[in-house]
């Protein structure tokens, strides 16, 4: 069994059920992340750079415009590829599974959340840049990415609604 660490959720996750931030290789000065898990559902949307990702022992090569999903409690790690430039910027969206339960009706909530909890055959984990071109997923992610750079009333609510829009677009894509 692969060794991993359990990541503790931060205050923002505790209070709001989600967090969204830009991760910059230059800012954090890291070569990637160690194998870890957390209860949160995590999405990585790559801006630039290239790295290899492992999710539950499956490998992916992720580059600009790609999106990858780490389901709740999936063992995952990221390593920037050698020989690449110093680039390595990506957005991170983490949401608690309870965030989805709160949004959906009782009738459907469990089915929606299950797609983000269980790693079942056929459920998508990776969306390539070409696949995302002009897609609702990319459009929703770009709207979410604009919010942290602006300061206005009700920003916290806008972030939650934009995060919900990203999750909805991904869920609709999975169901198709």
Image (tube, rainbow, N blue to C red):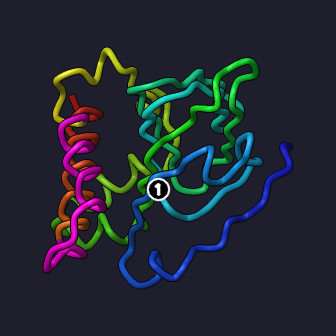
At 24% from the left and 34% from the top, the residue drawn is 138
**For numbered disc 1, what is the local secondary structure?**
strand
At 16% from the left and 67% from the top, the residue drawn is 105
Residue density around tag 1, few if under 14, some if 14–19, many if 20 or more, within 10 Å: many
Q: Quadrant of the C terminus?
A: top left
Residue 164 picture location, percent across and down: 23, 58
Q: Nearer the viewer, residue 143 or 116?
A: 143
Q: Nearer the viewer, residue 150 or 62?
A: 150
- Examine the residues drawn in magenta and state their main secondary structure: helix
Q: Nearer the viewer, residue 80 or 54?
A: 80
Residue 112 magenta-drawn? no
Corner quadrant of residue 19: bottom left
Residue 141 magenta-drawn? yes
Range covered by the magenta-colored residues: 138-157
At 73% from the left and 18% from the top, the residue drawn is 83
Residue 100 picture location, percent across and down: 30, 64
Residue 160 picture location, percent across and down: 24, 67
Residue 149 picture location, percent across and down: 28, 59
Looking at the image, is 57 positioned above or below residue 18? above
Corner quadrant of residue 122: top left
Is 103 situated left or right of 117 in this image? left
At 57% from the left and 35% from the top, the residue drawn is 88
Looking at this rendering, what residue extends furthest in the top direction? Answer: 130
Which residue, given by chain and number where applicable, does mark 1 sit on? 41
Q: Nearer the viewer, residue 56 or 144?
A: 144
Is 69 situated left or right of 141 in this image? right
Corner quadrant of residue 12: bottom left
Is 175 situated left or right of 31 in this image? left
Number of marks in picture: 1
Q: Quadrant of the N terminus?
A: top right
């Amino acid at each position: 069994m692969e060794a991993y660490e359990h990541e503790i959720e931060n205050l923002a996750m505790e209070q709001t059920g989600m967090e969204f931030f830009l991760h910059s290789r230059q800012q954090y000065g890291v070569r990637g992340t160690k194998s870890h898990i957390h209860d949160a559902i995590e999405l990585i949307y790559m801006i630039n750079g290239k790295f290899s990702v492992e999710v539950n022992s499956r490998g992916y090569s992720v580059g600009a415009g790609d999106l990858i999903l780490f389901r709740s409690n999936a063992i995952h790690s990221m390593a920037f590829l050698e020989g690449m430039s110093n680039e390595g910027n990506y957005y991170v969206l983490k949401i608690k599974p309870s965030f989805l339960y709160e949004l959906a009706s009782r009738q459907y909530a469990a089915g929606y959340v299950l797609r983000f909890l269980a790693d079942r055959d056929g459920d998508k984990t990776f969306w390539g840049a070409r696949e995302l071109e002009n897609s609702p997923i990319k459009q929703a992610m770009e709207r979410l990415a604009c919010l942290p750079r602006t300061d206005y009333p009700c920003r916290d609510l806008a972030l939650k609604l934009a995060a919900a829009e990203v999750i909805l677009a991904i869920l609709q894509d999975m169901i198709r």
